[in-house]
Amino acid sequence: MLLLTIETLPGQSIEALGLVKGTVVQSTHFGRDFMAAMKTLVGGEIQGYTELLDQARQIATQRMADEAEALGADAVIGVRYASASLMQTAAELTVYGTAVRIRSE
C-alpha cells in the first residue's frame, strides 16, 4: 500500500474511494512514567515515550492501510497524523487520509 502526504499521484489518474483512518489509544505504565520523571531532571530525550509513540504510529498506520485495502485502494494520499491527550496517562493517535484507486487508462 502506497502511503503519501501529497494530495495527488503525479502522472496518475485516480479515483477517490473515501476517507480512511486508523486510531489507537496508548497508555503509559508506572515504570515508564517514573523513568520519564527522572529524565526530566537532567534533560534529554525520553526514550521510553519515543518508543511508545512510534509503536502507536505503526499500529494506527497499519489499521488505516487495512481499511484502505478493504476498499480496494492502491494508495492513501493526504496522510496526516493527529494526537490528543485523553487523560494524564493515555493519548490517542489517529492517522487519516484519502483512499484512492489508480485508474489504468
Image: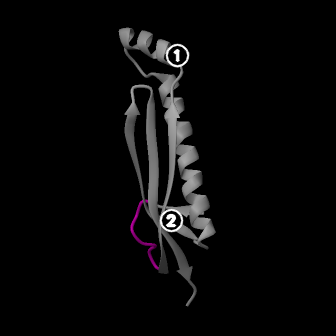
The quarter holding residue 55 reads top right
Residue range (magenta): 5-12
- Report whether residue 66 is seen: yes
Nearer to us in this view, 43 or 101: 101
Seen at 53% across and 48% down, the residue is 60
Q: Amino acid at mark 1?
A: Phe
Give the image location of residue 48, x and y in percent.
52, 23
Report the disc number at residue 42: none
User: On the picture, is 11 further left or further right than 66?
Assistant: left
Q: Which residue is mark 2?
A: 76
User: On the picture, is 80 further left or further right than 22?
Assistant: left
Would you call the spot at circle 1 few (<14 residues within 10 Å), some (14-19), or many (20 or more)? few
Q: Indicate the secondary structure of the residue bearing disc 2.
A: strand
Q: Which residue is mark 1?
A: 30
Give the image location of residue 42, x and y in percent.
38, 9
Which quadrant would the N terminus be assigned to in this image?
bottom right
Q: Amino acid at mark 2?
A: Val
Work out whether 10 lies above or below 22.
Answer: below
Nearer to us in this view, 47 or 64: 64
Tag 2 or tag 1, which sits nearer the N-term?
1
Seen at 39% across and 26% down, the residue is 88
Work out whether 102 lies above or below 66.
Answer: below
Would you call the spot at circle 2 few (<14 residues within 10 Å), some (14-19), or many (20 or more)? many
Give the image location of residue 80, x and y in percent.
41, 54
